[in-house]
Amino acid sequence: MRFSKKTVLVTGGAGGIGSDCVKKFAAEGAKVAIVDRSGDIARALAAEINAAGGTARAFVCDVTDNAQVEACVADVKAAFGGVDILVNVAGGSAREHRAFFYEQDVEIFRKNIEVNLFAAFYFARSCAPLMIEKGWGRIINIASIIGFNGHVKHAEYSAAKGGIIAITKSMAKEVGRYGITANTVCPGIIPTSNSNGGKGHGDLSHTNYLAMTPAPCDIANAVLYLASEEARFVTGMDLIVDGGRRLATRGTES
């Protein structure tokens, strides 16, 4: 019960990674705000958690709309008294519109940056003052290994996740004095989808890496570690959870 006195806000909380985070936090005593654009799924998940003895509530929000984000965080504060831990999971790739960067539609590029990078910024911006007031907090942003290396026909996603990696380091430097840490979890390919368009960690057709594919629960475990007191001295870091994908090279003898 590491989080029995904490309130956790999870964006994209009704999806694959998000729902695993929500369930694990609730199982360890946290009050959980499930933020998602799919209200029915979020409410069903909250009902499931409450029926099992946990505490959860669904909040519907378009994470790309700063006004809605501010209103959502205010609602969470009214319901639970504040936000101690922010987990930015909401995002997605434009895999259905895959194209070389010089052929990519500008609007698709812009929307991908908004749903991944701007959404994380909006929520961190709104939640940080609540954490500063308490003198404690955790900001955990879900990035991707693609944010380090880029990916063919995913320039927009690479840019967004690379931006998350960079902005999280700035956050860590700016809020550390208030007892707040900021870190990223960087998954590899995950064969799952969520209500915010899926966690687009590359092209799932690259089956040569599937032996090194993490599950959503693996990402959730990393998130809970970074949120815990065990990680109180970890900030500005990128926790890669990819089963060794970044180490893999074609042609290596077994």
Image (cartoon, helix red, strand yellow):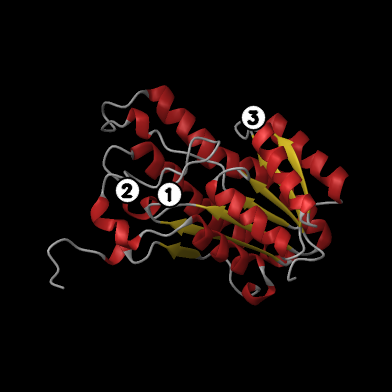
- Res 88 visible: no
Nearest to N terminus: mark 1 or mark 2: 2
Question: Which amino acid type is shown beneath numbered disc 3?
Answer: Asp
Q: On the rendered structure, is 222 left or right of 55? A: left
Q: Is residue 122 above or below residue 7?
A: above
**Which residue sits at x=68%, y=32%?**
40
**Which residue sits at x=68%, y=39%?**
42
Q: Tell me the distance, in whole angstroms, between the alpha carbons under discs 1 and 2.
A: 8 Å
Horizontal and vertical percent position of residue 248:
25, 64
SS class, disc 1: helix
Horizontal and vertical percent position of residue 212:
33, 62
Q: Tell me the distance, in whole angstroms, between the alpha carbons under discs 1 and 3.
A: 21 Å
Q: Nearer the viewer, residue 103 or 45?
A: 45
Q: Is residue 153 above or below residue 137?
A: above
For disc 3, the neighbor class at 10 Å (few under 14, some 14 to 19, many from 20) is some
Q: What label sits on residue 65 in the rendered view?
A: 3
Q: Quadrant of residue 200?
A: top left
SS class, disc 2: loop
Nearest to N terminus: mark 3 or mark 2: 3
Q: Which residue is mark 2?
A: 150
Q: How many marks?
A: 3
Q: Tell me the distance, in whole angstroms, between the alpha carbons under discs 3 and 2.
A: 27 Å
In which quadrant of the rendered image does the C terminus lie?
bottom left
